[in-house]
Image (spheres, rainbow, N blue to C red):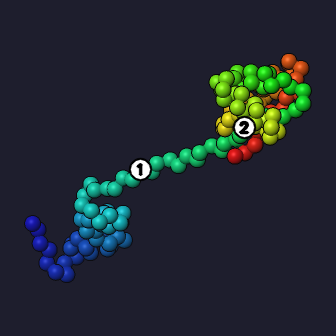
Amino acid sequence: MTRWPEGSADEPSQIATRRGRRPRAADDDRRKRGSEGGPGSAVITRTKPQTKKPSLYRVLILNDDYTPMEFVVHVLERFFNKDREAATRIMLHVHHHGIGECGIFTYEVAETKVTQVMDFARKHQHPLQCVMEKK
């Protein structure tokens, strides 16, 4: 290893200073990055994307004095996949309380079901009303 005499004009620190730079240590790059680990060490963090659960909506059937009970049962079976017993139970709840819940769905599904029921009721000339509300 070459040693320069102290005060020599050719000493590396003086050459670097003359060029407008300070002398560099071997680990300067690591210190600049703020890394405390050894060479080649890094911490990789993987963030899981945060997804929000969709809002849910209740689909409700409203009572009226003109729509036959059997038609309401048929609607519940056809559009809400209820069996005969569950459809009859919901229909009787609508008949006695004026309103009944057919199911709970995301916005798009609830909107589609309401539209299908209303169109089907109109097609068969019944005034059955079906609405949705945020749960």
- Which kind of residue does numbered mark 2 sit on? Glu
Tell which circle, 1 or 2, labels the residue nearer the N-terminal end: 1
Q: Position of residue 6 (x, y in %)?
A: 16, 81
For this view, does 92 lie left or right of residue 6? right
Q: Amino acid at mark 1?
A: Arg
Report how far apart the C-alphas of labels 1 and 2 lie in the structure.
Answer: 43 Å
The reply to whether residue 84 is visible in this rendering is yes
User: Quadrant location of the N terminus?
Assistant: bottom left
Q: Position of residue 25 (x, y in %)?
A: 25, 68
| Secondary element type, mark 1 | loop
Q: Is residue 111 visible?
A: no
The residue beneath circle 2 is 101
From the top left corner, tell me how far across and down residue 130 is, in percent. Answer: 80, 33
- Relative side of 103 to 71, left or right: left
Question: As displayed, is residue 125 above or below residue 40?
Answer: above
Image quarter for residue 73?
Answer: top right
Per the image, the residue denoted by label 1 is 46
Residue 33 versus residue 119 in the image, above or below = below
Residue depicted at x 50% and y 47%:
49
Q: Nearer the viewer, residue 74 or 25?
A: 74
The residue carrying pointer 2 sits among few (fewer than 14), some (14 to 19) or many (20 or more) residues within 10 Å by Cα, namely some
Front one among 9 and 132? 132
- Residue 52 at what x, y percent from top left? 58, 47
Residues at circles 1 and 2 in contact by the CB criterion of under 8 Å? no
The residue that appears at 27% across and 54% down in the rendered structure is 40
